[in-house]
Amino acid sequence: MADEAQIVYEYSAGSDVSFKTNNLSIAYHREGLSVSKRPDGNIYVDDPGIEYRTFTFSAIISGADMNELNTVQMAAITYDATYPRITKIYFAGAVTITNIEVVCTSMVGTDLGNGFWNISMVLEEYTTA
């Protein structure tokens, strides 16, 4: 079984939802990166340095947290220079990733009954510059 990670998703100042997951996936993207082999036999790399990450995970959360996410993601989300963001990702008790501005590109919730939800989320890093 994978180590458990905790993700703190803050969508406005002081308002956040925490997720505990054992299936966090982080995809690293390099937009515009090209590798080419030219007639001289050399391999060249052109990298404009445009990079971002996609965070994918699922977690079991309470109905109250699901209601909060539903209200925020569907009606009240505001994007600015700070929010929404992943405030912290803890890997095995240590903070390793902090303050990444993200946009939620997918959120799927499945009712498990007894007031709990299985939520799957995809958060994509963005910059405001």
Image (cartoon, rainbow, N blue to C red):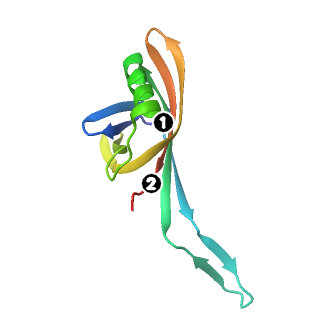
Q: Residue at x 33, y 39 (%)?
A: 10
* Residue 93 picture location, percent across and down: 31, 39
The image quadrant of residue 114 is: top left
Q: Earlier in the sequence, mark 2 or mark 1?
A: 1
The image quadrant of residue 60 is: top left
Residue 126 is tagged as: 2
Q: Which residue is mark 1?
A: 2
* Residue 56 picture location, percent across and down: 51, 41
Q: Residue at x 50, y 23 (%)?
A: 118
Q: Give left or right: position of 1 versus 12.
A: right
Residue most extreme to the left:
14
Above or below residue 52? Residue 124 is above
The image quadrant of residue 129 is: bottom left
Q: Residues within 10 Å of mark 2 (few under 14, many from 20)?
A: some
Q: Residues within 10 Å of mark 1 (few under 14, many from 20)?
A: few
Badge 1 amino acid: Ala
